[in-house]
Image: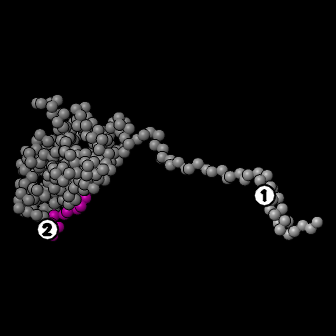
């Protein structure tokens, strides 16, 4: 019997189907579980960072070094301090690059609030401005009652005057005194030196060059040993002896508004405000400097302090 070719093909197909059915099924490749996002582990200490922009006097006087460790320990928060002129400090805050600002230019502070960079300003402390000059006093300023009188005598004598020239609170106050005389001094005036420097550097320049300058008393007292050629020519030896009440120098605290600057640490900034304006901390601010200089470098003025000391 002959086997036809078609029958052979059919038989082969049937055999192939049987072999395929009996072969073990291929094991699928194991699938990997989807990668899960990981979060950065918090710092072991949970430390927060508060950015403080402040005028140079609070740093140069040593006040911040004396009081900040207490806040840092109490709130487990490191305070990163940028100490520049008041104008620069307010500018830093207006960009949201600081959480809290501690400065001394009331007009600038009020404008900061009006522009929406802070909800309100808090009184914190004050000291006063004094006029410093060379001990030989070529402009015969010593003993004058006001800064305005002294500035006129300096100008009339063409005596060298060292200005911070840095848009700081002290520089703003100095320019306001010149303005009261109808004067806008510039570096074209040979006797006027706008340095663009902080308070410490400006006093050192005045000490070396025999110049007059306007300074805050706190920074002057803290650096007095380095300024042997300078003397207080207007303002007396203490704030109580300063006859020119326009030379009082108030400081304000401003927590940067998160509505305008969402990245700021507003809650921590307000904790700082509450801490610094508390009666206990105000007492420490008022005591600072007494043991070394025989007088306070700053005087407390917060609402809490005034309520506790109505007299």
x and y percentages locating residue 51 in the rendered image: 32, 48
x and y percentages locating residue 272 in the rendered image: 28, 40
Extent of the magenta region: 186-197
* First of labels 1, 2 by sequence position: 1
State left or right for residue 97 relative to residue 45: left
Q: Residue at x 28, y 51 (%)?
A: 261
Residue 194 inside the magenta-drawn segment: yes
State left or right for residue 302 relative to residue 22: left
x and y percentages locating residue 85 in the rendered image: 24, 54
Q: Residue furthest front?
A: 1
Q: What is the number of the mark on residue 17?
A: 1
Residue at disc 1, secondary structure:
helix
Q: Residue at x 10, y 41 (%)?
A: 241
Q: Residue at x 38, y 38 (%)?
A: 76
x and y percentages locating residue 101 in the rendered image: 25, 48
Q: What residue would you read off at disc 2?
A: 189
Q: Do the CB atoms of the residues marked 1 and 2 lie less than 8 Å apart?
A: no
* Location of the N terminus (image quadrant): bottom right
């Amino acid at each position: 019997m002959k086997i036809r070719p078609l029958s052979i093909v059919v038989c082969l197909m049937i055999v192939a189907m049987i072999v395929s059915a009996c072969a073990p099924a291929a094991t699928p490749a194991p699938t990997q579980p989807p990668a899960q996002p990981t979060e950065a582990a918090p710092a072991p200490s949970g430390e927060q960072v508060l950015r403080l922009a402040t005028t140079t006097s609070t740093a140069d006087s040593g006040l911040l070094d004396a009081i900040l460790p207490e806040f840092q320990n109490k709130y487990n928060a490191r305070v990163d301090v940028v100490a520049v002129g008041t104008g620069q400090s307010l500018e830093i805050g207006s960009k949201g690059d600081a959480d809290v600002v501690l400065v001394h230019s009331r007009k600038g502070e009020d404008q900061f609030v009006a522009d929406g960079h802070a909800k309100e300003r808090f009184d914190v402390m004050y000291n006063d401005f004094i006029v410093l000059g060379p001990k030989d006093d070529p402009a015969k300023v010593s003993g004058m009652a006001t800064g305005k009188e002294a500035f006129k005598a300096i100008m009339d004598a063409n005596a060298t005057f060292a200005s911070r020239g840095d848009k700081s609170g002290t520089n703003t106050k100095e320019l306001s005194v010149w303005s009261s005389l109808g004067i806008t001094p510039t570096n074209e005036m040979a006797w006027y030196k706008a340095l663009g420097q902080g308070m410490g550097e400006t006093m050192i320049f005045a000490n070396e060059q025999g110049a007059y300058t306007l300074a805050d008393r706190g920074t002057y007292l803290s650096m007095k040993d380095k300024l042997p050629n300078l003397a207080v020519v207007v303002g007396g030896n203490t704030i109580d002896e300063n006859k020119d009440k326009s030379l009082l120098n108030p400081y304000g605290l401003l927590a940067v508004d998160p509505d305008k600057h969402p990245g700021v640490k507003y809650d921590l900034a307000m904790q700082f405000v509450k801490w610094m304006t508390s009666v206990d901390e105000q007492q420490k601010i008022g005591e600072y400097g007494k043991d070394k200089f025989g007088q306070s470098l700053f005087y407390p003025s917060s609402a809490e302090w005034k309520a506790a000391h109505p007299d």
